[in-house]
Image (cartoon, rainbow, N blue to C red):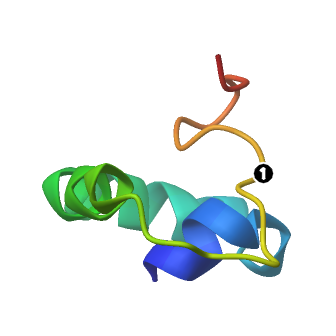
Amino acid sequence: MYFAVRYRPESLTTEDRWRVLTSIPNRLAYFDEQDFDMSPYEATGSLVPGREPG
């Protein structure tokens, strides 16, 4: 689910994305902190719906 939310959010419905973000925020933060090399993929958007990264 991390990959879908962080790198392919358009593949999820708004409801499913919200469900993941609110259900496992610590797990999402853990994977963000690991700094895995996800090339050739780039994170798109924010993990928070309606908010851009930065």
> Quadrant of the rendered structure where residue 7 is?
bottom right
Q: Is residue 10 above or below residue 46?
A: below
- Which residue occupies 77% across, 61% down? 42
Q: How many marks?
A: 1
* Residue 2 position within the rendered picture, expressed as x and y whole percent measured from the top left: 45, 74
- Report helix, strand or loop for mark 1: loop
Residue tagged by mark 1?
Answer: 44
Single out the residue that lies furthest toward the top. 54
Q: Is residue 24 above or below residue 4?
A: above
Q: Would you call the spot at circle 1 few (<14 residues within 10 Å), some (14-19), or many (20 or more)?
A: some
Amino acid type shown at disc 1: Thr
* Residue 5 position within the rendered picture, expressed as x and y whole percent measured from the top left: 58, 67
Task: Judge left or right: residue 9 versus residue 4.
Answer: right
Task: Judge left or right: residue 49 versus residue 23.
Answer: right
- Which residue occupies 67% across, 23% down? 51
- Which residue occupies 73% across, 76% down? 39
| Front residue of this view, candidates 48 and 36 | 36
- Which residue occupies 68% across, 59% down? 14
* Residue 3 position within the rendered picture, expressed as x and y whole percent measured from the top left: 56, 79
* Residue 31 position within the rendered picture, expressed as x and y whole percent measured from the top left: 30, 64
> Quadrant of the rendered structure where residue 32 is?
bottom left
Single out the residue that lies furthest toward the left. 26
Instruction: Give the quarter of the figure containing the C terminus.
Output: top right
Task: Judge left or right: residue 53 versus residue 26.
Answer: right
Task: Judge left or right: residue 37 versus residue 35.
Answer: right
